């Protein structure tokens, strides 16, 4: 039988040790673990996903999205709303006229990113999303959702460069496919 | 005779659970658990979604360890559709599921000690460690709680070498934390007074009521689905099942501590054995890209895993369409709650709170 | 030192005592009766201390008797309330006029 | 009740030790030029009263900050550090918050009693300050029954808690009130009995005299340096923790069981008053413990009031340390602990004191340790429920 | 200090009046809980009176035992027997008029007697101060027998209370 009351004293020893180490040690070794949020921030991991955004190349008009509506259909809580832009002739312009995402409904699952065949919708790192009213403030429209590819490269470098390479390859392939038709006489270097 | 409603708004009912307690002085002579305040139509929603999209909803069942739910659901659909899982993905799954178990267990222990009245100290120590694991989850899966990490026949993202190194470091440090935690409270006389011989659940009652998980094992019944089913690749690891003697609150508390140690053992082995290779079956990539094209053959499947709370089962019936015809979750929290009254009768009010805490319920799973 | 005329104190304690008697006579609730009795004992105590202060040559005597009275009062309260509780448990009432089994 | 002018106003030389005493004397002599004698007596009372009235809330405010800081550190957090440097203005922010909060009274509450309870609970808490010797010649009222006064006044605290719990018409409050009554009555007994040895040794009930009896060379005459002093101090301190409802004895307001116990239905300033009383009680009880066992304001080098506050501060930190470490007792264990463990121990302690009064030498030390050891062992053996069971866990494959 | 003494004297009369008001509250209020609180107030007032009569020790004991213990017990009993909602039951029986009449006679008779009696107020007693030490010596000297008897009475009451208040255990140990 151990001494009656020993457990109590040992517990007090542990708390006292933690009290002392909170002054001397680094966070990882028993020091204060708090991150003082607005001033200090922990970096977000690259894979971190929050709300979706739309990527454009160069200028906001050059949006990657073609308003195919796959993400709208696959979104589990159905928080995406897309309307196709019509050109002067009334034909679909393969561009979204309206692209709304209700952040109040979105559950950050990342399915839109997974299903998008045009690499145009990705999950953002910005988590400080707040609005006074959920019906108005949290529904984000196309204008707010559009972010540049540079921003995307900044927050998720690995994924962005992989996608850039893929897109480059596809483009080159396309160019190469187009080139033989246009410049056969030059006997150019076709694609392999 | 006094009738008191504990909950749905009460500091220690772990959510919107409600107990109607009949008291005689401080003694409980009747207790009725009331569920359903967090009912979100989980099963019905799932029956209207493609298979892959349901995965995101399983996160919301037991939101303390979403990865176990992912695991169970992925296992069930793989069984239904006959999908193969690559070797590396198997290991990653085990690693993530065991980390989730650790997260769950330390959170539960911390909350239970908080219910006992230890003013947040053990809880915050536990959360300090939990935070490290959650940071890892964020780095790997993209989210801290709602991981949505598993997919059919694989996992969504690879564990990089850096991640593996972090895990390695973590499991090396973890025993020290457990030592400190145990020194803080497990031998504490007040804690022993409060927990020992309180809320005794006999092994027989537990088996009859269908109790599973640490609650059952604390009652001395050797039943762990990791050993019984040997799902995934659990047969390759050497680990033990800790069993309690009396089935009281203290046993339920301590069995969890011991299970964390066993999980660390599994993690250690998995980290040394993990091979290189694919993390997802190439054939199954299309399920991710086009969820609605995935139509499992007509049939039914029941898959179960040892979630930290007990046997977590998914029952899925396919009629050949993209959506399951029937989808049911066997939620361990709900079934473990059924013996609450039995354990609480004749105890004091304060005991009812810790008995509830020791069952480890998550209302997201109980009410679905 | 404050010196009140002794009769004033005595009249005061007399009034207190009378109020106590009134309560003991008219209360239906047994606890109410007990409270009134405490009041009466208290009035008696005031007298004891006043006498010990003003008249006696051994000034401790009055105080010691008051001490005894307080002890007795505490005893009476404890036993009386225990009886009340026992009664309440059996008869579900604490009204004195509803307990008349031995009264005929 | 004799009313006289404080004996000497002149003739006190300035020193750090007598800082406050001199200050008060100066104010009084200054006033003495304009005012009649009887008003000076009133002024003397008023000065002490105002100081205590300001001291009480101030102590409460900064004890909450101290508690939050210390527990924060224990839990590897910062604690409040936003309002002002090191969060020093946090209590003021809290106060503003409390003042501006809505005062909610339940519809069916007993309105008058509901209002009176928080007021009534502060009064005894402030009254105890009167007999606490803050330093040499710094006792507000040097009662010759000081200690008994303290015990009596602190026993009133039960009543307001009852009032609050009953008037709220809330079942949690009612349960909390019942627990309070049981707990405070039970712990008052060992506490009073733990004080008895001190009275025996100093042969006085006056707090000032008790401190003076502990005067001695090298300050080794503090009562805690005797066997009965250690035991008495531990018991007194545990009972004091229980008396002011602090963890691990915080059953009346057990947050995880009874939401907030007797003050569940209180909000705003009324709630703050309950808290104020609790913290002031914690302070005065620690102060009394210092007076009784730790030599009060006795100590070398530093001014007496600094010694007193330093010792009290340490004891309060220990109380906070308890809060940061321990789980809560259960009702029956709590009562059992008081009646079956502390009470016999106090009785044995009185015996030890008698022994000490006969011979205070090494042999008495040894005898005391022997008696204590045997009685502790017996008590632990008799209270099997307090002793943890040894458990073995099977590891099955 | 004549001013202070006069002030103190009239304060004492005020305290007496307050005690009487609270005492009336004890016997007339409908809510029993309020009655108990009034009792507590009256008892604290009495303690103040004891201080005026230079019985500080008794005052402290009064508060400790009466307010701290007896009133608490009473409130405990009230809480256990009354319903939380506080039903308004008729608290007084129909004897209040005869009681008042009888008591008026009793009070007037005794008042007359008190005023007529030549009390032997001795100046020496007025000067004498009772110290706690003196009380203790008296208790252990002249009054040791009643003291011991009281302690036996207290023990008996303690045991009796426990026995009475204890619930009947169902005897199923055979």
Image (cartoon, coloured by chain):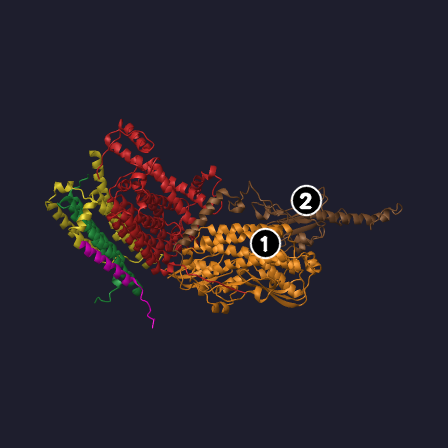
Determine the secondary structure under disc 1: loop
Does residue D31 appear left or right of residue D175 in this picture?
Answer: left
User: What's the magenta region?
Assistant: E146-174
Task: Give the answer, above or below, for where E96 lies relative to D212.
Answer: below
- The N terminus of chain A is located in which quarter? bottom left
**Chain coloured brown here:** A
Does residue B98 appear left or right of residue A56 in this picture?
Answer: left
Main secondary-structure element of the magenta-colored stretch = helix
Q: Position of residue B80 (x, y in %)?
A: 65, 65
Question: Which hue is chain B drawn in?
Answer: orange
Question: Which hue is chain E drawn in?
Answer: yellow
Residue beneath label 1, please?
B146
**Chain coloured green here:** C
Q: Is residue D95 visible?
A: yes
Q: Position of residue C45 (x, y in %)?
A: 19, 50
Does residue A46 appear left or right of residue D339 in this picture?
Answer: right
Spatial CA distance of label 2 from label 1 is 25 Å
């Amino acid at each position: 039988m151990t001494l009656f009351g020993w457990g109590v004293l040992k517990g007090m020893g542990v708390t006292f040790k933690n009290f002392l180490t909170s002054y001397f040690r680094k966070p990882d070794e028993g020091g204060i673990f708090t991150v003082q949020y607005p001033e200090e921030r922990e970096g977000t991991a690259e894979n971190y996903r929050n709300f979706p955004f739309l990527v454009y190349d160069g200028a906001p008009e050059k949006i990657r999205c073609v308003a195919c509506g796959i993400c709208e259909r696959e979104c589990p809580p159905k928080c995406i709303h897309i309307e196709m832009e019509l050109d002067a002739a009334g034909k679909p312009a393969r561009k979204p006229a309206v692209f709304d995402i209700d952040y109040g409904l979105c559950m950050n699952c990342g399915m839109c990113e997974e299903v998008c065949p045009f690499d145009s919708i990705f999950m953002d790192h910005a988590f400080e999303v707040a609005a006074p009213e959920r019906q108005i403030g949290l529904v984000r429209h196309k204008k707010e959702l559009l972010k540049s590819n540079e921003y995307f490269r900044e927050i998720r470098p690995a994924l962005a460069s992989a996608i850039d390479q893929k897109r480059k390859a596809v483009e080159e392939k396309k160019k190469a496919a187009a080139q033989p038709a246009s410049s056969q006489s030059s006997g150019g270097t076709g694609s392999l | 005779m006094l009738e008191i409603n504990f909950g749905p708004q009460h500091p220690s009912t772990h959510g919107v659970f409600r107990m109607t307690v009949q008291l005689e002085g401080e003694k409980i002579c009747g207790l009725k658990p009331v569920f359903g305040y967090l009912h979100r139509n989980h099963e019905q929603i799932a029956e209207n979604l493609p298979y892959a999209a349901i995965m995101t909803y399983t996160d919301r069942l037991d939101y303390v360890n979403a990865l176990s739910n992912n695991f169970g659901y992925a296992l069930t659909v793989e069984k239904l559709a006959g999908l193969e899982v690559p070797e590396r993905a198997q290991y990653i799954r085990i690693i993530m599921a065991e980390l989730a178990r650790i997260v769950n267990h330390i959170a539960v222990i911390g909350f239970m000690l908080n219910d006992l009245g230890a003013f947040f100290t053990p809880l915050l120590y536990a959360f300090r460690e939990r935070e490290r694991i959650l940071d890892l989850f964020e780095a790997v899966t993209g989210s801290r709680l709602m991981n949505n990490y598993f997919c059919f026949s694989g996992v969504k993202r690879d564990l990089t070498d850096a991640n593996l190194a972090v895990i390695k470091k973590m499991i090396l440090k973890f025993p020290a934390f457990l030592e400190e935690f145990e020194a803080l409270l497990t031998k504490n006389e007040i804690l022993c007074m409060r927990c020992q011989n309180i809320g005794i659940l006999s092994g027989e009652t537990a088996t009859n009521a269908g109790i599973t998980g640490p609650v059952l094992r604390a009652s001395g019944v050797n039943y762990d689905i990791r050993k019984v089913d040997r799902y995934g690749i659990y047969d390759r690891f050497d680990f033990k099942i800790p069993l309690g003697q009396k089935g009281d609150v203290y046993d339920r508390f301590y069995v969890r501590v011991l299970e964390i140690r066993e999980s660390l053992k599994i993690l250690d082995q998995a980290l040394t054995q993990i091979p290189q290779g694919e993390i997802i079956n190439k054939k199954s990539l299309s399920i991710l890209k086009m969820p609605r094209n995935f139509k499992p053959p007509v049939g039914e499947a029941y898959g179960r895993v040892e979630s930290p709370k007990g046997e977590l089962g998914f029952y899925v019936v396919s009629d050949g369409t993209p959506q399951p015809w029937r989808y049911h979750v066997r939620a361990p929290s709900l079934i473990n709650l059924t013996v609450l009254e039995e354990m609480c009768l004749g105890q004091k009010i304060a005991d009812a709170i810790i008995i509830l805490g020791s069952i480890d319920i998550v209302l997201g799973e109980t009410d679905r | 030192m404050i010196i009140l005329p002794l009769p004033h104190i005595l009249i005061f304690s007399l009034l207190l005592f009378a109020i106590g008697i009134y309560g003991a006579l008219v209360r239906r609730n047994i606890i109410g009766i007990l409270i009134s009795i405490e009041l009466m004992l208290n009035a008696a105590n005031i007298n004891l201390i006043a006498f010990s202060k003003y008249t006696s040559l051994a000034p401790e005597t009055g105080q010691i008797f008051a001490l005894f009275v307080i002890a007795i009062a505490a005893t009476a309260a404890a036993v009386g309330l225990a009886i009340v509780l026992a009664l309440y448990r059996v008869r579900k009432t604490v009204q004195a006029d509803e307990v008349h089994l031995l009264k005929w | 009740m004799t009313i006289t002018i404080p004996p000497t106003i002149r003739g006190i030389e300035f020193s750090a030790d007598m800082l406050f005493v001199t200050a008060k004397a100066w104010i009084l002599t200054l006033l003495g030029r304009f005012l009649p004698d009887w008003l000076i007596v009133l002024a003397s009372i008023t000065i002490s009263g105002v100081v205590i009235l300001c001291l009480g809330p101030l102590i409460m405010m900064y004890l909450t900050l101290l508690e939050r800081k210390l527990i924060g550190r224990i839990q590897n957090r910062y604690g409040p550090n936003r309002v002002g440097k090191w969060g020093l203005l946090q209590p003021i922010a809290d106060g503003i918050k409390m003042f501006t909060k809505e005062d909610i009274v339940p519809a069916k509450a007993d309105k008058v009693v509901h209002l009176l309870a928080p007021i009534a609970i502060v009064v005894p808490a402030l009254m105890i300050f009167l007999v606490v010797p803050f330093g040499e010649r710094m006792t507000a009222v040097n009662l010759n029954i000081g200690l008994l006064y303290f015990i009596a006044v602190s026993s009133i605290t039960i009543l307001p808690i009852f009032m609050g719990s009953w008037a709220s018409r809330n079942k949690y409050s009612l349960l909390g009130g019942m627990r309070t009554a049981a707990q405070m009555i039970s712990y008052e007994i060992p506490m009073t009995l733990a004080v008895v040895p001190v009275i025996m040794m100093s042969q006085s009930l006056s707090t000032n005299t008790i401190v003076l009896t502990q005067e001695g060379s090298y300050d080794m005459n503090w009562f805690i340096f005797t066997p009965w002093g250690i035991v008495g101090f531990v018991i007194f301190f545990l009972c004091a923790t229980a008396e002011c409802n602090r963890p691990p004895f915080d059953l009346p307001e057990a947050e995880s069981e009874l939401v907030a116990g007797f003050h569940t239905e209180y909000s705003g300033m009324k709630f703050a008053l309950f808290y104020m009383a609790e913290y002031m009680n914690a302070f005065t009880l620690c102060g009394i413990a210092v007076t009784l066992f730790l030599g009060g304001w006795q100590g070398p080098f530093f001014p007496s009031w600094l010694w007193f506050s330093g010792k009290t501060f340490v004891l309060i930190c220990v109380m906070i340390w308890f809060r940061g470490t321990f789980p809560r007792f259960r009702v029956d264990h709590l009562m059992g602990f008081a009646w079956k463990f502390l009470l016999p121990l106090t009785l044995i302690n009185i015996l030890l004191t008698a022994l000490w009064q006969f011979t205070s030498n090494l042999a008495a030390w040894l005898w005391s340790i022997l008696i204590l050891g045997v009685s502790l062992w017996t008590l632990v053996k008799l209270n099997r429920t307090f002793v943890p069971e040894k458990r073995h866990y099977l590891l099955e494959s | 200090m004549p001013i202070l003494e006069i002030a103190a004297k009239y304060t004492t009369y005020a305290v007496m009046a307050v005690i009487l008001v609270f005492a009336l509250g004890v016997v007339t209020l409908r809510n029993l809980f309020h009655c108990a609180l009034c009792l507590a107030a009256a008892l604290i007032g009495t303690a103040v009176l004891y201080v005026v009569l230079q019985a500080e020790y008794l005052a402290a004991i009064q508060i400790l035992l009466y307010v701290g213990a007896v009133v608490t017990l009473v409130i405990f009993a009230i809480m256990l027997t009354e319903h939380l909602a506080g039903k308004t039951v008729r608290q007084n029986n129909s004897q209040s008029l005869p009681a008042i009449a009888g008591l008026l006679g009793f009070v007037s008779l005794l008042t007359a007697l008190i005023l007529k009696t030549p009390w032997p107020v001795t100046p020496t007693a007025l000067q004498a101060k009772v110290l706690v030490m003196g009380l203790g010596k008296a208790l252990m000297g002249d009054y040791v027998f009643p003291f011991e008897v009281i302690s036996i009475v207290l023990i008996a009451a303690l045991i009796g209370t426990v026995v009475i208040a204890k619930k009947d255990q169902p005897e199923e140990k055979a």
